[in-house]
Image (cartoon, rainbow, N blue to C red):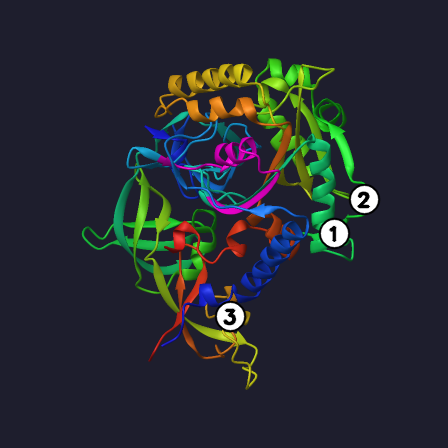
């Protein structure tokens, strides 16, 4: 009897993946972060118009551990990280799995700039030689990495300006097809300062309230992480949840209960910054894998 | 009607009254943004290829195509000839309509031919086919690591990755939907 060859041939990738996970854990433990686990099945997620949850006996599988992580921050935990699986309904492509692995970390007492530095240090511990090649692109990881505003990225790479793209409702297409493939092509790029309407849980920039303190990290055209300075104003957060939940319900999606406990505890949450990094994509990048299928043992199609 | 979640490689849609098949498909979604479905479509009548991106919320008319059970007869200068076993009607598919599936055709194979009116425009093969390896590097004794692979060519000229123990003359099973090696066939 021969074993399942489709599984057997993934051995090298799975061994590399295990080492990457170990390095990540050591990185955060050495920096005094507490590793936590929060429930995968929750009454509701933070409502976001374009993220759909998988239903589970009247509750939902979490699309991100964000709300529970922030409740821990509000309870006084200063530095947290979590490696967990998340579910997002109907997301399947060469860079998407409906069940995927997420690395989230949170730090209190600072804004999103500290997270950019931590991303740089994390990659340095994963790839001390400071160089990597992904699908033929040579990437120099030496710090500091590029910081590029969303508006500048549209001017540099897009067929129209950010304002035009937003007015024509073509922001997502221009980002995906014109801008993303060219981001992080020699050095990693932090795409920073998103329009505030595109950041449901991020704090507005204190001097420029039309942009939010949100960034996405791109390396070799791969979107790896989304981060922001957390919104800590419960009144503004409640209004944004209502707006996003209205969009969800108008699109016929199952309603989430309002996250009252979260909103109440947000009052005691200190200034903080948080980041969600797609672990599978990071493994793709570090192992030069073209498709997400190569870095997990089982895709849904193999079950 | 079909929705975006029905879109994948092989989905057939009616566009402007003509059947089209998705030959390349990718789902993409910028962080926190809406889902985008990037398709390369082939017009199943003219063979013309083009790209189109759909957004969640759009809907599609499925291509109403009849499938007929037929048997593969032979290849000649006009293309690949199939026959309906019930009424002995024949239809010919050209190279383009078959694509890579031509590599998995075996004499007398029973297939489903997709008909647009009286015209054969596509084919559905059995999920698995057995083909003999005609070219592969020899097995290096001692190379027993499960998961090692190498290229091999089969009798139809198709090249694929196989485990290291597969040698010239080995009969192997191939999944015709993915073109990938499945297992060695006991003879």
Q: Which residue is mark 3?
A: B147
Q: Which residue is mark 2?
A: A143
Numbered mark located on residue A124 in the image: 1
Q: Identify the image quadrant of residue B1.
A: top left
Residue A227, magenta (yes or no): no
Residue A65, magenta (yes or no): yes
Asked if the residues shown at circle 1 and circle 2 are in contact, with their CB atoms under 8 angstroms apart, the answer is yes
Chain letter for mark 1, please: A
| Residue B74 drawn above or below residue B183 | above
Q: Identify the image quadrant of residue A40.
A: top left
Q: Nearer the viewer, residue A211 or A3?
A: A211
**Count of all numbered marks drawn on residues in the image:** 3
* Residue B30 placement (x, y as % from top left): 57, 32
Q: Nearer the viewer, residue A100 or A178?
A: A100
Residue at 60% over, 52% down: A284
Q: Which is more N-terminal, label 2 or label 1? A: 1
Residues drawn in magenta: A60-85
Q: Identify the image quadrant of residue A153.
A: top right
User: Disc 1 versus disc 2: distance between alpha carbons?
Assistant: 9 Å
Q: Is residue A183 visible?
A: no
Q: Nearer the viewer, residue A116 or A93?
A: A116
* Residue A23 placement (x, y as % from top left): 64, 57
| Residue A141 drawn above or below residue A151 | below
Q: Nearer the viewer, residue B44 or A232?
A: A232
Other-residue count near label 2 (Cα within 10 Å), few / some / many at <14 / 14–19 / ≥20: few
Q: On the picture, is B87 further left or further right than B156? A: left
């Amino acid at each position: 009897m021969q074993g399942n060859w489709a599984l057997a041939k993934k051995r090298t990738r799975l061994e590399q993946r295990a080492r990457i996970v170990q390095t990540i854990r050591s990185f955060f433990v050495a920096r005094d972060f507490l590793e936590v686990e929060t429930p995968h099945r929750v009454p509701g997620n933070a409502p976001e118009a374009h993220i759909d949850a998988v239903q589970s006996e009247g509750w939902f599988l979490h699309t991100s551990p964000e709300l529970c992580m922030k409740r821990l921050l509000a309870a006084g935990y200063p530095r947290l990280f979590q490696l967990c699986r998340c579910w997002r309904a109907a997301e399947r492509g060469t860079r998407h799995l409906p069940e995927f692995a997420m690395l989230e970390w949170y730090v209190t007492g600072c804004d999103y700039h500290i997270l950019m530095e931590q991303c740089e240090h994390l990659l340095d511990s994963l790839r001390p030689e400071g160089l990597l090649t992904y699908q033929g692109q040579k990437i120099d990881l030496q710090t500091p990495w590029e910081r590029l505003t969303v508006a500048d990225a549209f001017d540099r790479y897009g067929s129209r300006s950010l304002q035009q793209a937003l007015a024509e409702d073509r922001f997502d297409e221009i980002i995906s097809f014109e801008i993303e493939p060219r981001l992080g092509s020699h050095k990693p790029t932090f795409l920073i300062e998103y329009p505030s309407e595109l950041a449901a849980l991020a704090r507005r920039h204190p001097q420029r309230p039309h942009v939010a303190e949100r960034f996405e990290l791109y390396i070799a055209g791969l979107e790896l992480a989304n981060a922001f300075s957390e919104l800590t104003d419960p009144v503004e957060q409640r209004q944004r949840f209502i707006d996003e939940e209205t969009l969800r319900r108008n699109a016929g999606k199952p309603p989430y209960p309002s996250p009252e406990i979260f909103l109440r505890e947000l009052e005691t949450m200190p200034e903080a910054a948080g980041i969600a990094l797609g672990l599978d994509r990071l493994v793709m990048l570090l192992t030069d894998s073209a498709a997400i299928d190569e870095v997990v043992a089982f895709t849904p199609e193999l079950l | 009607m079909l929705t975006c979640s029905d879109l994948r490689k092989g989905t057939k849609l009616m566009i402007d009254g003509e059947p089209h098949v998705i030959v390349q498909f990718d789902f993409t979604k910028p962080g926190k943004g809406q889902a985008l479905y990037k398709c390369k479509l082939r017009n199943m009548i003219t063979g013309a290829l083009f790209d189109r991106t759909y957004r969640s919320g759009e809907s599609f008319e499925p291509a109403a195509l009849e499938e007929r059970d037929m048997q593969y007869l032979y290849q000649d200068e006009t293309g690949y000839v199939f026959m309906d076993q019930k009424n002995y009607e024949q239809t010919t598919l050209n190279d383009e309509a078959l694509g890579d599936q031509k590599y998995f055709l075996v004499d007398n194979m029973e297939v489903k031919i997709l008909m647009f009116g009286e015209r054969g425009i596509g084919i559905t093969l059995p999920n698995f086919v057995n083909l003999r390896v005609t070219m592969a590097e020899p097995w290096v004794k001692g190379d027993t690591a499960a998961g090692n692979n190498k290229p091999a060519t089969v009798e139809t000229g198709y090249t694929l990755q196989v485990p290291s123990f597969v040698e010239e003359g080995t009969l192997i099973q191939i999944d015709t939907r993915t073109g990938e090696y499945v297992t060695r066939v006991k003879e």
